[in-house]
Image: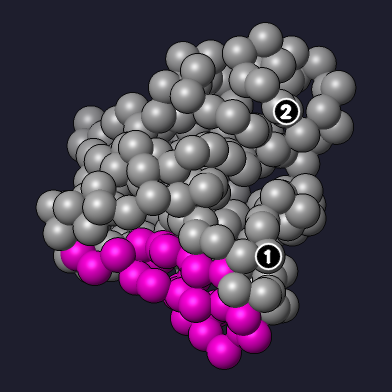
Amino acid sequence: MGSLAGEERRKWLLDELQTSQSIALTEAAAALGVSEMTVRRDLGELEKTGIARRVRGGAVYSGPVSFEGRERSHAAQKRAIAEKLLPLVPTRGVIAMDSSTTMHRLAQSITGSDDLTVVTNGLITFQVLQDRPGVTAILTGGAADKRSDSLVGPVATAFLDDMRFTSFFASAAAIDEKACYEDTLEEAQVKRAFARSAAQIVIGAHSEKLGRNATATALKLPSIDVLATELSASDENLAPYRALIATVR
């Protein structure tokens, strides 16, 4: 029973981490009715699997987060980023969007256009763009990744290699002064394929992703043309990126 209870605790912790991306020791201990030391040990077991990373006072999730969980996280910041990026969306031509919840917010902001084609590997983003006047949405094809509601794999990348986009709009799991990163190798591979076919690469990410890295490198920072966050473009936290990226919004 002790072992089973431990498994149940760790499943509860994992569910909370996947939903909220972080968890506090005190809150987890109170919810589970155990000591903080017990929670600390459970988080240590999750850390060994690569799912969690312990930080002061708790842990953060280090694996792929469900679309629903990501959609609830940092909603206000994502809306602010979408507002900054909307003027960069042309009224006609062919653009690309990744499967991120930030680009989903941007897609929601597109109420109509003259003759715009949007190619995406995001199932939810594709659905949002249906029936928008003057907008044609196209899915890349590929294998469905239920963790992110996205299409990945060789079919997706082969399709993208034959396309040409004026702009690729994307987010990232993490960004540091070297690159943009993703939580899975498959998602990183698709983003590199999008980028190879795009004349301009636009990244929108909330500021908590800055100064961090994740499992797989997707895009080298010098290849990025525009970086948008919810912060003011003059914010000191963006100083390292202003030196490396042409436009920081």
Vertical placement of residue 165 versus 210, above or below: below
Q: Amino acid at mark 1?
A: Thr
x, y percentage for residue 80?
78, 52
Magenta-span inclusion, residue 216: no
Magenta-span inclusion, residue 131: yes
**Residue drawn at 73 percent across, 20 percent down:** 238
In the displayed structure, does residue 121 sit left or right of residue 24? left
Which residues lie in the magenta part? 116-142
Quadrant for the C terminus in the image: top right
Label tally: 2
Vertical placement of residue 35 versus 107, above or below: above
**Residue drawn at 60 percent across, 73 percent down:** 115
Q: Nearer the viewer, residue 103 or 139?
A: 139
Color encoding of the figure: one colour
Marks 1/2 in contact by CB < 8 Å: the verdict is: no
Whichever of callouts 1 and 2 sits on the residue coming sooner in the sequence is 1
Distance between mark 1 and mark 2 Cα atoms: 22 Å
User: Does residue 225 appear anywhere in the picture?
Assistant: yes
Residue furthest out toward the bottom: 131
Vertical placement of residue 178 versus 78, above or below: above
Residue that numbered label 2 is attached to: 248
**Residue drawn at 44 percent across, 42 percent down:** 198
x, y percentage for residue 4?
18, 59
Q: Which image quadrant is residue 12 in?
A: bottom left
Packing grade of label 1 (10 A; few <14, some 14-19, many >=20) is some
Residue that numbered label 1 is attached to: 91
The circle drawn on residue 82 is none
User: Does residue 58 appear anywhere in the picture?
Assistant: no
Packing grade of label 2 (10 A; few <14, some 14-19, many >=20) is many
Q: Secondary structure at mark 2?
A: strand
**Residue drawn at 49 percent across, 66 percent down:** 118
